[in-house]
């Protein structure tokens, strides 16, 4: 949908909030400011001294690092300030300040937004200091601060003998992951991260701190289960369902490129009927000058011998011996460290160097685009995907990238498409197309990768299947329908109720419902 287009009998507006909009606050604590108008040095100082956390201004030596996002391609973003909020009241003070002074805002948890939307030209509201994690094994629940990093969630929840399904990147913030969906290796067994949200604590545009659960503000809970971060308020904490930890077995199968077509075709047929205990992805990668890498990997909730029986039909259907094969049991935490790419490191080391003194991980530069496949792929679809990876290698032979197919089904697809805001409940797999580069990569090569993604969107991906909102894509033209489909109208209505002034506004924020037609 383009801005202003009619969908489901409604008109949506996507303009920024007007400066004349007033926001009333009913929280008992004092407001940050007593005057409105443009923010001055004095008003920024007043905001900083009012916070339990801290305010980083451009004059602070930390600013040069603190303004950066995880994706190092976003190096030219310079907010006016970064507020490290230690309490929900800190967040409320920041929202009150932004409304009073007409300052743009951007909530930030881990700073992993694919579109760079964790930053703005105004005030970044960073929740990383609200990162406490506690588990109630008897109730099978966990309370998690919105700024907690995924590796820390896995560590604490895992040490309590429980599991929360989630993604693989260790430094991603739990808030962005959970609010937009949360695809992970236990999704087919236990659902998306968003499916396991019991409640959220959220600070809305009027600077009120609300609880949203099935009994209170249930529409806001619904919107928080897949509606994406930064649309309805600033979430400061979650309550999640967690699950008793199963036995876990990992596997990897790699094949020669000549077998890539049969591998992808067989994988689609196989995963379509696989048991819930199995999650798998299929990757068609080009490794630059190292050539191609077609592989199938996955995680199975069960023993290696059980997995062997599940894998046997796949191997038979591919019909070519793998060039590499691995299968082995792991603990839950060890499995997630392997998926995170930080196996063998301490939990502290599985952080960015700028987030933890012991951190060993670095930022990355990449671009991405997503799509879906609805069911097993026919020969024409398979051929198109194989050719697409060969196209990337031909036009940018030194770049690493390609296609990754992450399996849906199981518990993910048993949820009705309108039961939560996450609408993609009838898919076989999500496709993520990516390419990455280093600081030594020539701009012409990076541009070639961008052209490949654009070409992929126009000529290979099926736009009718949608796109994954957590792989948010600034180049996607029909993004509201692609991300939210039939749930868009209800999301816009909830947006209008909780954020009538459009304070939470960015290039791909959910539009408000302006009027019925």
Image (tube, rainbow, N blue to C red):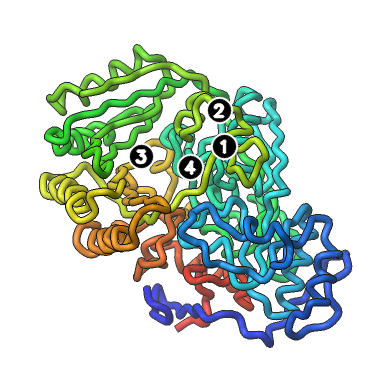
The answer for how far apart the CA atoms under marks 3 and 4 are is 11 Å
* Mark 1 or mark 3: whose residue is earlier in sequence: 1
Disc 3 designates what residue?
Answer: 409
* Mark 4 or mark 1: whose residue is earlier in sequence: 4
* Quadrant position of residue 81: bottom right
Q: Position of residue 495 (x, y in %)?
A: 57, 69
- Total numbered labels: 4
* Mark 4 or mark 2: whose residue is earlier in sequence: 4
Disc 1 designates what residue?
Answer: 360
Check disc 3: other Cα within 10 Å, few if <14, some if 14-19, many if 20+: many
Secondary structure under tag 3 reads loop
* Quadrant position of residue 26: bottom right
Q: Position of residue 93 (x, y in %)?
A: 79, 66
The answer for how far apart the CA atoms under marks 3 and 2 are is 32 Å
* Mark 1 or mark 2: whose residue is earlier in sequence: 2
Mark toward the viewer: 4 or 1: 1
* Mark 3 or mark 2: whose residue is earlier in sequence: 2
Instruction: In this rendered view, identify the residue nearer to me: 61 or 18.
Output: 61
Check disc 2: other Cα within 10 Å, few if <14, some if 14-19, many if 20+: some
Secondary structure under tag 2 reads loop
* Quadrant containing the C terminus in the rendered view: bottom left
Disc 4 designates what residue?
Answer: 192
The answer for how far apart the CA atoms under marks 1 and 3 are is 35 Å
* Quadrant containing the N terminus in the rendered view: bottom left
The residue shown at (50%, 66%) is: 490
The answer for how far apart the CA atoms under marks 1 and 2 are is 8 Å
Disc 2 designates what residue?
Answer: 345
Q: Is residue 39 above or below residue 344?
A: below
Instruction: In this rendered view, identify the residue nearer to me: 414 or 146.
Output: 146
- Label 1 close to label 2 by CB (< 8 Å): yes
Secondary structure under tag 1 reads loop
């Amino acid at each position: 949908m383009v801005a202003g287009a009619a969908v489901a009998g409604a008109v949506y507006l996507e303009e920024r909030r007007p400066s004349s909009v007033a926001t009333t606050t009913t929280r008992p604590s004092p407001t940050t400011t007593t005057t409105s108008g443009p923010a001055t040095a004095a008003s920024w100082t007043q905001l900083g001294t009012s916070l339990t956390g801290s305010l980083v201004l451009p004059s602070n030596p930390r600013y040069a690092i603190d303004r950066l996002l995880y994706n190092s391609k976003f190096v030219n973003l310079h907010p006016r300030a970064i507020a490290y909020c230690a309490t929900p009241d800190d967040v409320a003070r920041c929202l009150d300040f932004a409304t009073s002074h007409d300052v743009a805002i951007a909530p930030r948890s881990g700073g992993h937004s694919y579109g760079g939307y964790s930053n703005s030209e105004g005030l970044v509201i960073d929740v990383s200091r609200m990162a406490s994690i506690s588990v109630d094994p008897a109730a099978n629940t966990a309370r998690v601060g919105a700024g907690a990093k995924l590796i820390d969630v896995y560590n604490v929840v895992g040490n309590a003998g429980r599991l929360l399904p989630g993604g693989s990147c260790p430094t991603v913030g739990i808030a962005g992951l959970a609010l937009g969906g949360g695809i992970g290796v236990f999704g087919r067994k236990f659902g998306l991260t968003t499916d396991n949200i019991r409640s959220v604590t959220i600070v809305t545009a009027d600077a009120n701190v609300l609880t949203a659960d099935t009994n209170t503000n249930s529409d806001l809970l619904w919107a928080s289960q897949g509606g994406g971060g930064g649309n309805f308020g600033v979430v400061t904490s979650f309550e999640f369902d967690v699950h008793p930890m199963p036995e876990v077995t990992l596997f990897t199968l790699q094949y020669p490129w000549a077998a890539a077509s049969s591998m992808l075709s067989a994988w689609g047929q196989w995963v379509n009927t696989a048991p819930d205990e199995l999650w798998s992805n299929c990757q068609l990668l080009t490794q630059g000058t190292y050539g191609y890498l077609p592989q199938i990997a996955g995680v199975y909730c069960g023993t290696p011998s059980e997995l062997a029986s599940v894998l046997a039909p796949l191997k038979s259907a591919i019909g070519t011996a793998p060039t590499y094969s691995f299968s082995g049991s792991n603990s839950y935490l060890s499995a997630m460290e392997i998926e995170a790419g930080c196996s063998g490191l301490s939990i502290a080391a599985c952080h960015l160097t700028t987030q933890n003194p012991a951190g060993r991980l670095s930022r990355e530069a990449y671009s991405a685009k997503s799509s879906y496949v609805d069911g097993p792929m026919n020969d024409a679809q398979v051929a198109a995907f194989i050719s697409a990876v060969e196209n990337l290698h031909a036009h940018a032979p030194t770049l690493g990238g390609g296609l990754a197919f992450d399996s849906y089904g199981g518990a993910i697809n048993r949820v009705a498409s309108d039961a939560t805001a996450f609408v993609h409940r009838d898919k076989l797999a999500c496709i993520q197309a990516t390419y990455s580069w280093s600081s030594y990569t020539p701009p012409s090569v990076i541009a070639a990768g961008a052209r490949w993604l654009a070409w992929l969107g126009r000529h290979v991906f099926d736009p009718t299947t949608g796109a994954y909102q957590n792989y948010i894509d600034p180049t996607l033209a029909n993004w509201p329908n692609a991300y939210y489909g039939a749930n868009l109208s209800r999301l816009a209505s909830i947006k209008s109720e909780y954020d009538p002034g459009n304070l939470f506004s960015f290039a791909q924020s959910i539009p408000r419902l302006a009027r019925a037609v």
